[in-house]
Structures are given as structure tokens and as C-alpha cells.
Amino acid sequence: MMPFKRIHTYIFFQLIPSFGISLFFLTFVFLMTRIPQITNMVVNYNADVSAILMLMGFTIPRFLEFTIPMSAMISILLTFMRMAGENEIVALKGAGASLYTLLAPVLVFSAIAAVMTLWVTVWGVPWGKLSLRTTSIELARSSIDAALQERQFNSRLENIMIYVSHVDMNTRELTDVFIEDRRTPGVVAISAAPRGRLVRQGQQPFYTIRLYDGAINQVNAEDNAVTHINFGHYDINIDLANMQKQGAGHFEKEVDELFVGELLQKLATGFPRKDMDREALMLLHEKFSIPIACLALGLLAFPLGVQSMSLRRSSGFGMGIAFFLFYYFLLALGWSMGKSGSYPPFIGMWLPNVVMGGAGIFLLVRNANERPVRVPGFITAAGARVAQQFKLRMGR
């Protein structure tokens, strides 16, 4: 019994370095997708470096939700590929160890990864999303430049939504401006103009958006009246200091910003629309199905690694990502079908785990009975291609 305990300890500690490297690498790659947006905010909107670092930090939990299961799968796959390639698996089998015996450290490692992912999905993701939105709103209220991002519907200012096709930060000229103003109770004013200009009044946080050759559509809900006005130029004044004073902390959480307790409470009382009930229910199941995916993917990676001794480690890395992308495809399909009401949210969120875990059990039994199933050539080719693309991206 003692030699098997040593083998289990040996395998468990072999998994940790690959997991750490994969987690750092994948999270870094995902984080790099935010670089254009961050560079834009630093260069054009004079955002403080500390605020930018905070925004980056708030996005990390959303990435970890997927990079932890992905890294766990890649770690298990690479570790057993190495052991198979160096004939350690053959030696262990010769010593009387079966694949079922070697499965124990894999399950323990996957369970630890599942607990880490559960903490991220239950607490980290809603905290990160809520903090990200709060910080973004505060940043927009401290400088209107941050609220004038091109080709985005920016609703960070209290009761004002702004869309601008193009912003020249040197001249403050605006192109194709659309503004929805709800600051007057019971009145919605929608202004649209082909061009405009941002004017700052002295050094105070008071701005004027001056529109040219546009039109205003004003809807008064109390009087059921609609007014249409064409103008040569029209000024919309925005007092950021007053907006900060009135709007601090006063906004309702989005569904994906709710913690589990809040989500359950909302589901008990009911949302205004049925589709929101389905979305909230799917989100609740997703918070627990993704952590369990660590076990399902680990169970799949173990027999794949054992029988893939002829593949290089780079191909194994790519193959791990390819299988996770297939899992993510099933998860996205479940989201789409569950949100449309085609089948219950429970099925949409848990079916990917059943598919991947079932495939892992099938491969494990086949390998344990010395009847391995060959991985289709297109999957290994796809894995090699994915690994090559990662190398090219990191080499730039």
C-alpha cells in the first residue's frame, strides 16, 4: 500500500507545475485581449494608472472561471503524456498498478480545481463584474471623456445614454451623435445630430455637448405628448460634480452581478419578464456546473494522456484547448437553447459535463482493458494548429 501512496503523491506534485504555468499563460493571453481598450483609455481619456490596474484586476475572475478548468485539463493531459512517453506508465503497470489505481490523484487534483473554480463563480465573478461597473461609472463621472467611447452605447452617466460614431480627442469634435436624456422626471429627450463638439466650462467638472444641424424627439409620459424639433445648434449641459453627488451607489445590479443568495431571492420573488427568470436560473446552474466541469474534463484528460505517448507536448497543449473549446461550444449551445426555452436550463448547463465525463469514463474503461480508442486525426491536427497559433501570438 505504501508504494502506491508514494506514486499518488508523485503524480499529484507532477500536476502542479503544469497547472501553474498553464493558468498563468492562459489568463495572461485572455487579459491581453483588453490591451486595446486599456491603451485607448490611457492615451485618449487620461485615465489614472491605478484605475486601469483596478479595471484589469476586476476582469480576472471572469477569465479564471474558464482558465482554471482549462489549465487543470491541460496539466493532467501533459503530465500523463510525459509519463507515457517516458514509459513510466508501462513500469507502473508492470509493478501491479492499474489505471484505476492511478486515477486517485487525478480526482483529488480535479476536486481542488473544482473548489477553486466554485469560489470564483460564486463570489469572484459577481464581485468582479459589480466592481468593474462601479469603477467604470465613477471614472466616467470624474471625466466625461471616458463616457465618450466610440461606437458604444455609453450609459455610465446618470440618466444619460450617449452614442458617438467618432471622437477627435484633439479638437473635441464629435461625429454622428445620439443622446438619450432622462434627467427630467417623466420626460425622455432623444437628440441626434451628424456632428457636435465637447466644450468644457473653465476648470470645473461642467461640460456642454454642442450639437449642430440635428433634431430632438421629446416624449412626455405624463401628458402622452410627443414633440419634434429641428435645430441649427443645441447645447446639452452635464454637471459631473452634481451627478457624482446624486448618483453615487444608486444603481440596480444586473443579473450576472448578483451573488447566489441574491439570485435565489430574486428567483423566489420573480423577475419582471419570463426570459429574465430563465437567464437567472441558467446563471445559477452555470455557477455550479462549470466547477464540476473540472472533474469531467480531468476524467477525460487522464485516458487521453495515457494513450497519447506518440504526441509531442505542444500538440497535447493544443489538444487540451481543442477539447475545452468543444466543451465551451456545448455550453454556449446550452445557453442559446435554454434561453430560448427549447429545453430546461438544468439540461443546457449540465449536459456538457455529462458528455465530457461520459466520454472520459468510456476511454478510461477501454484503456484499462488494453483496448485504447485512437484519437481522430483531425483532433490532433487541430490541437497542433492551436498550439502553433499560441506560439505565433506569444512571439509577436
Image (tube, rainbow, N blue to C red):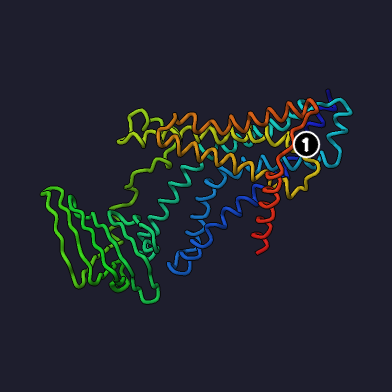
State the residue at coordinates (66%, 34%). Answer: 110
Query: Is the residue 171 above or below the residue 190 in the image?
Result: below
Measured as percent of width and height from the top left, residue 188 is found at 21, 54
Disc 1 residue type (three-letter):
Gln
Q: 10 Å neighbourhood of mark 1: few (<14), some, or many (≥20)?
A: many
State the residue at coordinates (67%, 40%). Answer: 73
**Residue 298 quadrant:** top right
Residue situated in front as seen by the camera: 87 or 47: 87
Residue situated in front as seen by the camera: 273 or 356: 356
Measured as percent of width and height from the top left, residue 320 is found at 67, 43
* Quadrant housing the C terminus: bottom right
State the residue at coordinates (17%, 50%). Answer: 186
Residue situated in front as seen by the camera: 90 or 21: 90
Q: Which residue is outermost to the front?
A: 377
Measured as percent of width and height from the top left, residue 192 is found at 25, 64
Query: Is the residue 288 above or below the residue 172 in the image?
Result: above
The secondary element bearing badge 1 is classed as helix
Which residue does the numbered mark 1 point to in the structure image? 307
Q: Which residue is outermost to the left?
A: 223
